[in-house]
Image: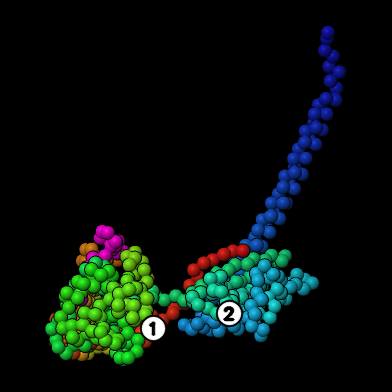
Amino acid sequence: MRWNPEDSRGSALVMAMFALVLLSGMGVALLFLSRNESKMSQANLRLRKAFYLAESGLEDARTTLFLLNGEGPFSDDLATAAGPDGVMDFDPENLTGVYDGNGNVTGFAGFGDDVPLRAMTSLATAESPGWYAAFLTNDAIDVDPVVDTNERVMITAVGVGAHRSLEIVQAIVRPYQYVPSVPAAAVTMLGPLPSYDNGNSVAQSHTGNDCGVPGGAFAPIIGTIGSAASGQVEGDMNRPDTFSSGPLPFEGGDTIGDLTDPTDPIVADAGHGTIDPVWEDCEALKEMMLNLALNADYYCNPDLASCSLPSTSAADDVIFIDGDLTTTPHASFTGILAITGKLTYKGNTDWDGVILVIGEGIIERNGGGSSQPSGSVIIAAIDPTPDGPNADKSDWCTTPPDGFSSARYYTTGGGNSEVEWCTGNVDAANSTRSYRVVEFLQR
């Protein structure tokens, strides 16, 4: 058999046509895929914008609630949110946008007569329309929708963008303070076997009566962690007859309480409950001190300059001394005083508020006078190698087993100095700074 070239005429054209059809199909498929990806990208971008709008509504509502409520309870805000009928109708599952003929939001529906915490707010521009609103409800732990029992509420914010894109976010918020719940004691000595010496002056006065007023609320004068620590302080105590707290028999050694034991007589009778566990968490105390340093109204590092207290302070100012401090006589201050080194306070230095000596954990009361720390004093030795300011605090909380060493409090010199527990001064110093988000959900 012989091959005849004329038999293959036109095959190249067929192959070319086939290749052209194949490439055209692939091109159409790629174009279709590209358009779909572009549409999906645009849809995703619109949803992302709606999410950011919802987050903006959440932050706006959180600020609004704080400005309206401050340190007050949330129940009145929940009652307002429930509307005229007093029933909380809001349910995020029923929340929808109401649109005009151009696709712009004119409002929201699905919440009955409830009153929004933040009514519909526009962030729209010609290129990127957007709106948000926010609503207040109680958190799921509380049984009654309009009665808050745990200082926690929920904010739900909705964001709406172009092409009816809608996102909903929710957050549970609570009041935020720089210092956690302050222990109910005039002086709290954290850690094992603290060293306590209140001197021999017969003129001293130590009281756990609230702001020095007998017959009302009271607390231990010295609060400790564990019964062994309480026994150590009682054994160290001089002049126990200068200690009094609440009704008899809480005087002398009986005014020392183990703040971790709800059956301790003075802890049980005072009725404040046991200490917040955060005070037994060394890393939490370290984080608290670092946060106070960042937010201090007055900060001083003795390695860089001579440190003294400012001439005046507001009721909730934060004064942070990153090292040792010796106060000058005849001084009166308010707020939170945080010290990482040793505090030596002179005879006539008064302080209304909270004193935190956390780090080296040593307080010396020196010289005569009538000084009166009124509020709460908390001491913790969590710096195992105190050698002056340590910017990163990297060696804090490294002492086995839990980071705490023995705190020290001692008095040298006479005078009629007084130490008292005072909730009014504590609350004024440790004010609510904002509402912090403790849980977050994107629906």
Secondary structure beneath dot 2 equals: loop
Under mark 2, the amino acid is Val
Secondary structure beneath dot 1 equals: helix
Q: Which percent across, then down, holds residue 102?
A: 77, 71
Residue 414 falls in which quadrant of the image?
bottom left
Q: Which percent across, then down, holds residue 426?
A: 35, 83
Does residue 391 lie above or below 37 as drawn? Answer: below
- The residue at the far top in this view is 1
Main SS category, magenta section:
loop
Count the labels in the image.
2
- Point 14% across, 88% down: residue: 202
- Point 56% across, 82% down: residue: 77
Residue on which the image places disc 1: 427
In the image, 271 versus 85, the foreground residue is 271
Q: Which percent across, then down, holds residue 189?
A: 26, 73
For residue 400, say whether it is visible.
yes
Residue on which the image places disc 2: 146
Residue 180 falls in which quadrant of the image?
bottom left
Left or right: residue 17 versus residue 276 is right
Give the number of the mark in front: 2 or 1.
2
**Magenta region, residue range:** 392-411
